[in-house]
């Protein structure tokens, strides 16, 4: 204690209090960097991202570079057993099942991605207009949503299919028609909340144009919600596509759903034709779902200090 | 005066991921019997965390009480078991939270929320009786301790106490003491739902809620702000606790209702002979009603003393700053409101020394490097290096400024 | 509350009406019309048109259709001449069709709702423990693996390979086990996840801290305050859950050879059985609207914030 006092004695002199250095040295992290940091924090996210990237790469690369045809009938390979050349064997048309499986994935991803983009876009626009305009416009749009939301999507898909015939666009169209409703509701809720925020009122009172308020102040602030609903929409659309293909109401293109359906019929003789696409589909869903969950957690402003 | 609550050297931290943030860094204070102790500080100074930690109410994880003792009626609350502590919470120490709208269950009727608490503490269940009998039996040879136990756990006093001890000793002397005591406890503790309901209605009437019978059936969102806070107060006082922790009870209210609620609280506290810890960020609120004041900053007490001492014999530069920052009607309007430069400390990056050293006008090199020692002047305590004999020069500066400011106040 | 119910009922009625109308006019848009089969002579086609009332102006057909529907008469099937669509759907003789589907759906609903809530509660109240992690993992799998994959694989394993359970039908209790489980997995997972999130959210609510400060016992805080409030959001997803069960029945019925409505629907579309498509579409729609209505009213009843709103 005594020896310490000797040192301390010299410290009793006035000093400027503001410790500018210390204050400015505090780490300043932008929101997106913070989100990214939280997102990549968990090791499982890295693993599943790599896995998903691998699956997507296979879907678009394997069919493009595979030397084995998957159209027409390949006589010499019909019902080929799994071998070094045909990793998962070949089906009743002699198509290499490994190649065909990844080709099927293309359909899934196309449907999932395109319809998720479109339905999010429509949802954001309708939701933003409804929330910002309020009054009669809001009433009308929201009642429309109320009506549409209780119509089962199956019904719309099947009726649309009856009219437009079966193609990948029918499926996308039907999924978009039924998929934008939730996004619209979410975005509307957010906009209603944001509309009363001071900075929006300030912008309004200083005569900033409506479009500018909408696109520069309101919509960017709903981005978190929109991203989350987008990541949920992708697996949902892929799910629906697989489901429709499975019950034979799909696009007619080869897809995971239709492969599982045929796989089911030949499950005793060629179990791989059932198991392989089932596993790949389930894994893909798992990856997207998990990454979506992690992204939602990372974006959650409640956890942000 | 006897200390009702004595909190010694509390350390509380919050863990998030790998970082550990110390929210309370060695805070000590006490509350005397029948007094209003005010804890004042800016938001983030740790007022709520400190008081809630006394009842181990902070969410854990992430919160964690690292060290400290909380002596209340001869027991260290930090060392009680969870079920022992449950009998203290609400019954002997209760809490009034800031915003009754979120602090009361939105889907439960007001009446049910009050009666639920009364029944929990006043009705003796078989399990309660068994547990209590277990506590009584070891005391059978020590009548003094037994009496104390009765006072504390059964609210027995005066004639009732005599009767209780007489009855108990009869059972304790019998052959099957445990069973006898349990049966006695069960009989003594009968409390019907109807009784609880009636009590709740009386409580609501007592906090001046009109038509209390009707309010019992309502939900919290059906009440106005002032009514909500009254319900909260009625609930907190329902078991006649010996100490009430009021955590910014008027912050969420309009100015006009604020005074009403504070008056009501003061009146009830006086008539119930209860002590209160009044947490606030507004020094003006407590000037008129508190007996003693503790000023918190950065998870520590800067200064503690009686209201008079704090206001007229201010020892800490931070307290002086707080008083300067309050708007005053008696001074010319041309006077600018003064502010304390800088902002409250970030708990992640606390200075090694005094937490206020980054904003203090009388800062010395030592303040930044070392924790200030405690100086005690007739119960008026302060943590500040200015009161070290070696800091005489700097202290004169402070005294001069204080003179100037206090002088202005008394003009 | 009355206003709330009236409003919901009104929206539901409008929804059914809009659905019926939209379906009617959409089906009028079907290219090639009906009876596009080139083998049918013009004369025969005209006769058929007259028989089904398709020769009248569209608007008149529409009014007829609405009138008949009000009488619960859905007309005659085209693919199965002479059979009333109402009888096909209800099929009192064989017990197939609607009763079969209803039974499957109800079994799954009754199984999955308590199961999901129980799992979610166990997981939410034991956060971070092994049980919690197991439930999280299982529910992720339940959400990720489509029901048709589960159904196909379980039928192969438990039915064909191990022979423990029958692979077709839905009449005896033993036959009901596999289809019910297959159909329930994804709703169980969804409910469990939501229940868990909801519990965690409620746990951080101020009123839980108040309940603790009141000195209530842990058990009582959990049951009366935490679980009760956490259940509210779970009620709201019962509507979407019912919808997904409806779609799920299509798959499960087809895999387990259950003669329910799903098969009829897919068949009717392949056959372009106009009346049947329309009847089933409106039926499904009405069913879902009714389910959502029940959920909305139920929610209003249990949440005082809605019940007491004037």
Image (tube, grey):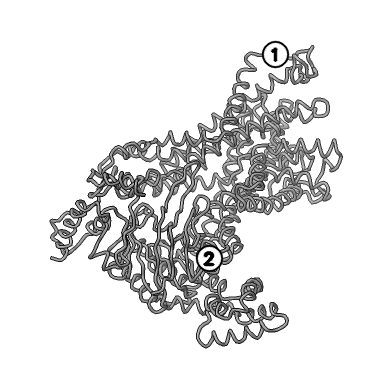
Query: Where residue C310 sits: x, y (%)?
Result: 46, 64
| Label 1 – label 2 distance at C-alpha | 67 Å
B103 lies above or below A207: below
Q: Are marks 1 and 2 on the same chain?
A: no
- Return the residue nearer the eye: A6 or B263: A6
**Furthest residue to the front?**
A2
User: Quarter-wise, where is residue C138 in the image?
Assistant: top right
- Secondary structure at badge 1 equals loop
User: 10 Å neighbourhood of mark 1: few (<14), some, or many (≥20)?
Assistant: some
Query: On what subunit does the disc labeled 1 rest?
Result: A
Q: Are marks 1 and 2 in contact (CB under 8 Å)?
A: no
User: Quarter-wise, where is residue A155 in the image?
Assistant: top right
- Secondary structure at badge 2 equals loop
Query: On what subunit does the disc labeled 2 rest?
Result: B
Position of B186 with respect to B209 (left or right) is right
Name the residue beneath numbered marker 1: A69
Query: Where residue B24 sits: x, y (%)?
Result: 42, 53
Query: Where residue A10 sits: x, y (%)?
Result: 26, 44
Q: For the residues carrying marks 1 and 2, which lies nearer the camera in this image?
A: 2
Query: Where residue C150 sits: x, y (%)?
Result: 73, 38
Instruction: Please give the name of the residue rendered at 33% of the width and 39% of the height, measured from the top-left corner.
Output: A213
Name the residue beneath numbered marker 2: B108
B132 lies above or below C77: below
């Amino acid at each position: 204690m005594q020896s310490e006092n000797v040192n301390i004695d010299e410290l009793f002199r006035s000093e400027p209090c503001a410790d500018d250095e210390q204050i400015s040295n505090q780490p300043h992290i932008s929101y997106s960097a913070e989100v990214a940091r939280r997102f990549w924090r968990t090791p499982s996210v890295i693993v599943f991202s790599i896995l998903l990237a691998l699956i997507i790469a296979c879907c678009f690369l394997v069919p493009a570079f595979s030397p084995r045809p998957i159209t027409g009938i390949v006589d010499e390979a019909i019902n080929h057993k799994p071998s070094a050349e045909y990793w998962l064997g070949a089906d009743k048309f002699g198509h290499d099942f490994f190649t065909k499986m990844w080709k099927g994935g293309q359909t899934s991803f196309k449907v999932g991605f395109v319809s998720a983009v479109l339905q999010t876009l429509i949802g954001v626009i309708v939701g933003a207009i409804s929330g910002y305009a309020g009054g009669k416009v809001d009433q009308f749009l929201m009642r429309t949503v109320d009506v549409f939301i209780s119509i089962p999507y199956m019904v719309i898909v099947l009726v649309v299919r009856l009219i437009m015939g079966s193609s990948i666009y029918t499926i996308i169209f039907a999924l978009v028609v039924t998929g934008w409703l939730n996004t619209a509701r979410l975005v509307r809720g957010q906009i209603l909340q944001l509309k009363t925020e001071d900075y929006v009122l300030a912008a309004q009172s200083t005569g900033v144009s409506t479009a500018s308020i909408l696109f520069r102040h309101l919509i960017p602030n709903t981005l978190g919600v929109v991203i989350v609903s987008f990541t949920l929409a992708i697996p949902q659309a892929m799910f629906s596509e697989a489901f429709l293909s499975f019950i034979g109401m799909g696009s007619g293109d080869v897809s995971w759903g239709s492969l599982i359906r045929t796989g089911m019929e030949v499950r005793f003789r060629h179990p791989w034709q059932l198991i392989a696409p089932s596993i790949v589909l389930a894994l893909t869903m798992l990856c997207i779902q998990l990454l979506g969950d992690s992204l939602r957690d990372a974006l959650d402003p409640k956890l942000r200090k | 005066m006897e200390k009702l609550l004595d909190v010694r050297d509390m350390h509380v931290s919050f863990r998030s991921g790998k970082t550990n943030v110390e929210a309370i860094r060695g805070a000590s204070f006490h509350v005397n019997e029948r007094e209003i102790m005010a804890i004042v500080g800016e938001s983030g100074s740790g007022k709520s965390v400190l008081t809630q930690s006394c009842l181990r109410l902070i969410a854990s994880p992430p919160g964690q009480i690292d060290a400290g003792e909380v002596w209340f009626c001869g027991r260290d609350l930090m060392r009680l078991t969870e079920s022992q502590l449950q009998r203290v919470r609400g019954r002997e120490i209760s809490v009034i939270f800031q915003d009754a709208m979120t602090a009361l269950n939105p889907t439960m009727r007001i009446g049910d929320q009050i009666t639920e608490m009364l029944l929990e503490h006043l009705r003796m269940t078989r399990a309660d009786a068994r547990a209590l009998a277990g506590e009584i039996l070891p005391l059978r040879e020590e009548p003094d301790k037994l009496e104390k136990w009765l006072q504390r756990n059964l609210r027995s006093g005066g004639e009732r106490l005599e009767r209780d001890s007489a009855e108990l000793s009869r059972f304790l002397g019998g052959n099957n003491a445990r069973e006898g005591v349990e049966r006695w406890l069960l009989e003594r503790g009968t409390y019907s739902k109807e009784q609880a309901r009636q009590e709740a209605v009386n409580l609501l009437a007592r906090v001046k809620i009109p038509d209390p019978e009707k309010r019992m059936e309502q939900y919290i969102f059906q009440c106005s702000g002032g009514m909500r806070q009254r319900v909260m107060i009625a609930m907190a006082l329902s078991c006649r606790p010996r100490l009430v922790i009021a955590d910014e009870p008027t912050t969420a209210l309009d100015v006009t209702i604020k005074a009403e609620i504070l008056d009501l609280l003061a009146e009830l506290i006086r008539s119930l002979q209860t002590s209160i810890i009044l947490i606030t960020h507004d020094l003006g609120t407590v000037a008129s009603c508190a007996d003693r004041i503790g000023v918190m900053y950065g998870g520590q007490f800067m200064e503690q003393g009686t209201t008079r001492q704090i206001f007229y014999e201010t020892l800490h530069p931070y307290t002086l700053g707080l008083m300067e920052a309050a708007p005053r009607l008696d001074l010319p309007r041309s006077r600018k409101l003064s502010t304390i430069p800088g902002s409250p400390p970030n708990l992640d990056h606390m200075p090694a020394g005094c937490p206020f050293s980054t904003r203090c006008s009388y800062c010395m090199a030592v303040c930044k490097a070392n924790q200030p020692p405690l100086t005690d002047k007739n119960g008026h305590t302060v943590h500040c290096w200015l009161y070290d004999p070696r800091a005489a020069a700097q202290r004169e500066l402070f005294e001069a400024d204080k003179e100037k400011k206090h002088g202005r106040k008394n003009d | 509350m009355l206003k709330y119910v009236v409003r919901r009922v009104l929206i539901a009625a409008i929804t059914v009406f809009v659905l019926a109308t939209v379906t009617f006019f959409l089906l009028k848009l079907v290219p090639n019309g009906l009876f596009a089969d080139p083998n049918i002579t013009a004369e025969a086609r005209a006769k058929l048109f007259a028989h089904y009332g398709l020769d009248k102006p569209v608007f008149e057909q529409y009014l007829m259709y609405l009138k008949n529907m009000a009488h619960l008469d859905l007309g005659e099937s085209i693919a199965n001449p002479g059979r009333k669509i109402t009888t096909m759907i209800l099929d009192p003789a064989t017990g197939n069709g609607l009763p079969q589907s209803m039974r499957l759906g109800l079994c799954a609903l009754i199984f999955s709702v308590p199961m999901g809530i129980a799992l979610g509660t166990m997981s939410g109240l034991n956060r971070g423990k092994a049980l919690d992690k197991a439930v999280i993992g299982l529910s992720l799998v339940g959400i990720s693996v489509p029901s048709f994959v589960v159904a196909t694989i379980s039928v192969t394993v438990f039915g064909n390979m191990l022979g423990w359970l029958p692979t077709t039908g839905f009449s005896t209790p033993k036959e009901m086990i596999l289809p019910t489980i297959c159909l329930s997995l994804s709703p169980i997972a969804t409910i469990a996840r939501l229940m868990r999130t909801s519990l965690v959210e409620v746990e951080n609510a101020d009123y839980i801290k108040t309940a603790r400060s009141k000195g209530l016992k842990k058990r009582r805080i959990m049951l009366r305050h935490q679980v009760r409030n956490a259940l509210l959001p779970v009620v709201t997803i019962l509507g979407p859950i019912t919808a997904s069960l409806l779609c799920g029945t299509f798959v499960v019925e087809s895999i387990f050879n259950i003669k329910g409505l799903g098969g009829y629907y897919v068949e009717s579309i392949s056959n372009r059985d106009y009346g049947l498509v329309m009847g089933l579409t409106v039926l499904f729609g009405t069913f879902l609207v009714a389910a959502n209505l029940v959920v909305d009213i139920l929610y209003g009843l249990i949440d005082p914030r809605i019940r007491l709103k004037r």
